[in-house]
Amino acid sequence: MAESVCSEASGRAGVARLTALLAELDERNLDNVTRTESYLELYALTRAHPPDLPWLLMAHLVSRNAGCLMTEIAAALDRGDCGVAPPALRELFLFLERANHLIFFDAWYHVLHHLLGRSADLAPDRCSRFMREAWVRHEGARRAGLPHPAVERALVSDLVTNEQNLIERRVAHHPRFAVAQALVALAEAFGQEPPVVLPCTQASIQVGGFARLERRIRAGMRIFDAMADRATRDAMYAWARRHPHDGARPPWGGPERPKLRDAWPAHAVRALWDGIHAPPEPDPGWP
């Protein structure tokens, strides 16, 4: 077994806790709210037992933004005055939910294996070759004592690259979401792309071309750069702890909206498409 990188995993209580979190993957992948709060919970664990994994805080904040957008879609459906047909809006919601679901399904599995010191046990049919090799590189760099900021940034880059390739053919260019993809492109063309808003910073990050893989990856790294400073990261974490995620806008300074689970209960989401929470389809382009 690989040497544990998270000191939490070195004791029996730590192993038990991390093992339990891994076993709860399906439960925690129920909806955007459970995913978003799970990322923050696991980030808190890595803060308590350094080194922390900033990608988890990034994932929390990006997932929080996605949840707020999902609530905005529900509000638009209720108003019926946004100029977009309801079936197209529902597909846009499914587009966001599918990407959110797949990324969590993938990351929760391999990040917890890393924290448990079990990266060597990552199954080829469950984790991409790229990410299996990335954890080997990262853990080797840590054991070699390489400078922490460089090691941290390299891992974030690998995680962002993996997650965006994970959804590239399964969501971003999947025929099932052709209408949603067109809506995203139209919003971008008219300058209406919603930015990723980050607390405790003036950063407001747009992809500027969601259909282009390299632009999504660059946007992910801009998010990391906005929180690479330790004081800023600490402030973001404190803000997130003060504002539990429910999909409503007020913590972001926007108008009042219903809670996400009231607008999109899990059973209603599954009724829209029974494949929404299916495991990832095979992708020979990202084995």
Image: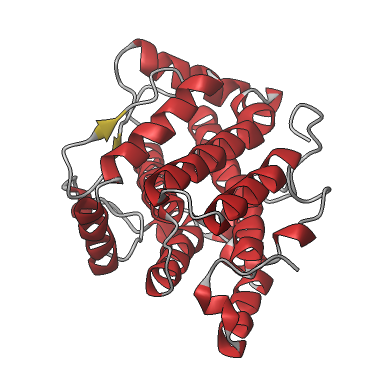
Residue 51: image quadrant is bottom left
Residue 79, visible in the rendered structure: no
Q: Nearer the viewer, residue 271 or 120?
A: 120
When the figure is inspected, residue 30 is found, relative to residue 19, above or below; the finding is above
**Residue lying at the far front of the rendered structure:** 144
Q: Is residue 8 above or below residue 184?
A: below
**In the image, farthest residue toward the bottom:** 12
Which residue is found at the position 59% from the left and 46% from the top?
Answer: 103
Q: How many tags in the picture?
A: 0
The single residue placed furthest to the top in the displayed view is 189
Compared across the picture, whether 157 is left or right of 188 comes to: right
Identify the image quadrant of the C terminus. Answer: top right
**139 or 118: nearer the eye?**
139
For the N terminus, the quadrant is bottom right
Q: Please determine whether, in this image, residue 49 is positioned above or below residue 143.
A: below
Colour scheme of the rendered structure: secondary structure
User: Which residue does the image show at 49% across and 55% down from the upper left?
Assistant: 145
Decide if residue 212 is on the left or right side of residue 273: left
Q: Residue at x 81, y 55 (%)?
A: 123
Residue 269 rendering spot, x and y as whole percentages: 58, 51
The image shows residue 121 at horizontal and vertical percentages of 78, 61
Q: Position of residue 160 (x, y in %)?
A: 52, 38
Q: Front-most of 178 and 81?
A: 178
Going by the image, does 276 lie left or right of 94? right
Residue 236 visible in the picture: yes
Expressed as whole percent of the image width and height from the top left, the position of residue 210 reads: 48, 23
Q: Is residue 49 above or below residue 177?
A: below
